[in-house]
Image: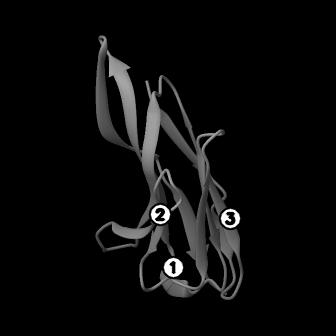
């Protein structure tokens, strides 16, 4: 009953910016870490950035200094501000959240994933 929905992807020129958003909904007891991952054509999914419930962040070296991850716990949302975009940033970006939810009266924690949003950086 948990859904993650991404938005904000699109086509931008090198050097441009995009802001990705992800909203979680459903029968959620808690959300711990949230993050963004991406999969470029022909490559495996890779970590882009993560943020804990307390606000601690972690970034891939390739995006550090250009991307900023943030979250709004009240809105159950996570964001990724992407600046100075490069062609190599082209990928499908996926929202991830480690979510606690009650199933049959028992609290379970599991990773949930959004469907992805396409980011294309090209002139």
Classed neighbour count for the residue bearing mark 1: other residues with Cα under 10 Å, few (<14), some (14–19), many (≥20): many
Q: Is residue 96 visible?
A: no
- 94 or 107, which lies in front? 107
**CB under 8 Å between discs 2 and 1:** no
Q: Is residue 89 left or right of residue 73?
A: left
- 7 or 121, which lies in front? 7
**What mark, if any, has residue 34 been given in the picture?**
none
**What mark, if any, has residue 92 been given in the picture?**
2
Q: Secondary structure at mark 2?
A: strand
Position of the N terminus by quadrant = top left
Q: Quadrant of residue 121?
A: bottom right
Judge depth for marks 1 and 3 and give the one in front.
3
Residue placed under numbered mark 1 in the picture: 89
**CB under 8 Å between discs 2 and 3:** no
| Residue 65 in the image: above or below residue 53 | below
Q: Quadrant of residue 80?
A: bottom right
Mark 2 and mark 3 lie on one chain; the one further toward the N terminus is 3
Classed neighbour count for the residue bearing mark 2: other residues with Cα under 10 Å, few (<14), some (14–19), many (≥20): some
Residue 16 lies, in percent from the top left, at 71, 82
Q: Residue at x 46, y 56 (%)?
A: 52
Residue placed under numbered mark 3 in the picture: 19
Alpha carbon separation for disc pair 2 and 3: 14 Å
Residue 3 lies, in percent from the top left, at 48, 34
Mark 1 and mark 3 lie on one chain; the one further toward the N terminus is 3
Q: Residue at x 51, y 76 (%)?
A: 90
Alpha carbon separation for disc pair 1 and 3: 13 Å
Q: Residue at x 42, y 66 (%)?
A: 38
Residue 94 lies, in percent from the top left, at 46, 56
């Amino acid at each position: 009953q948990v859904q993650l929905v991404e938005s904000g992807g699109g086509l931008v020129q090198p050097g441009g910016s995009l802001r990705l958003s992800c909203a979680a909904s459903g029968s959620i007891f808690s959300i711990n870490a949230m993050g963004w991952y991406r999969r470029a054509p022909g490559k495996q999914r890779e970590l882009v950035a993560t943020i804990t419930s307390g606000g601690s962040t972690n970034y891939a070296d390739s995006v550090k200094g250009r991307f900023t991850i943030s979250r709004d716990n009240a809105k159950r949302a996570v964001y990724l501000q992407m600046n100075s975009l490069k062609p190599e940033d082209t990928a499908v970006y996926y929202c991830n959240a480690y979510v606690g939810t009650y199933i049959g009266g028992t609290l379970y924690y599991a990773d949930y994933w959004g469907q992805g949003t396409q980011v294309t950086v090209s002139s």
